[in-house]
Amino acid sequence: MLALYLLIGPVWFSACQSATAPAAQLPVGAVRFEASAAYKGWWAVVQNCSGLTGDFNAVQWYQVPATTTFAVAGSGPANGAWYSNGNIVVLAGDSAQSGQVVRHEMLHSLIGPVSGHPAQYFYTKCGGIVACATNCATEALAAVPTVDPASPLVDASTVQLQATTEPASFATARSIGWLTLVVKATNTGANGVRVRLPRLTPGSLSGPLFGYSYNGSGRFDLTNDAVLYLPAGATRQRAFDIRVSLLDTGARLRGAFAAESTVVITLPPI
Ligand SMILES: [Zn+2]
């Protein structure tokens, strides 16, 4: 079944900047907009992974229409930026519907004014939920566990897999037009394990990590790693943002990990 999936590599577009400049120095062309109901759902997803809570209505949203990046005063180009002064998020227009990029900026807002990207949040707690590339990815390395080469090699089926959706109601998802599926893989054992990751085909250099299908179509991320190291109790996760059409009358969702281990959830039809 997974062979039918559309293959898309894990491409994060975010090159976020966290800016302290006053709001008067917002990027040229930035225009204010009202956050959609989908944004409220994405805010809930970030609150959930981070364990932090904040006032969604306190964030001001701007976008620079029809751009992939914009210039941040005193810094480089970015496709998203959070300004602590005024609790303002600015998004490149092309990223305004990217749940991963929008959630990255939401996480900045929830953490508050600290420098850079704390690895505890951007990797350990919310890795896979929020985009983390370029400078974020460099800073996240601090939290990536060192593989224990003596730890046992196990199959993906030994990892506990969970899937949840935001919103939980399909009727709500249908009215919002979006559904976020979060797939979690947890090592519930007392010792670290190296989970074997299958190859796409024998001899292939890459293989699937997390994936999903929604009413029969879906995607998965590819990784070149042969194993995923999970320390005792550790969780890796991935959020997939799925557009829901008014024509969809029900949701059959399958979250997948390493292709071999899957979990199915069916949201009640409306
Ligand atoms: Zn950032």
Image (spheres, rainbow, N blue to C red):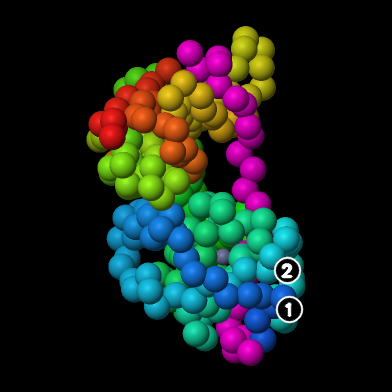
Q: Report helix, strand or loop for mark 2.
A: strand
Q: Nearer the viewer, mark 1 or mark 2?
A: 1
Q: Residues within 10 Å of mark 2 (few under 14, many from 20)?
A: many
Rendering coords of residue 159 (x, y %)? 33, 28
> Given contact means CB atoms under 8 Å apart, are the residues at marks 1 and 2 in contact?
yes
Q: Residues within 10 Å of mark 1 (few under 14, many from 20)?
A: few
Q: Which residues are magenta?
A: 1-24
The residue sitting at 73% across, 61% down in the picture is 67
The residue sitting at 43% across, 25% down in the picture is 215
Rendering coords of residue 147 (x, y %)? 48, 38
Residue 70 bears which disc, if any?
A: 2
The answer to whether 251 appears left or right of 33 in the picture is left
Rendering coords of residue 123 (x, y %)? 47, 53
Q: Amino acid at mark 2?
A: Phe
The residue sitting at 60% across, 78% down in the picture is 19
The residue sitting at 31% across, 68% down in the picture is 53
Q: Nearer the viewer, residue 168 or 36?
A: 36
Residue 28 bears which disc, if any?
A: 1
Spatial CA span between label 1 and label 2: 8 Å
Q: Report helix, strand or loop for mark 1.
A: loop
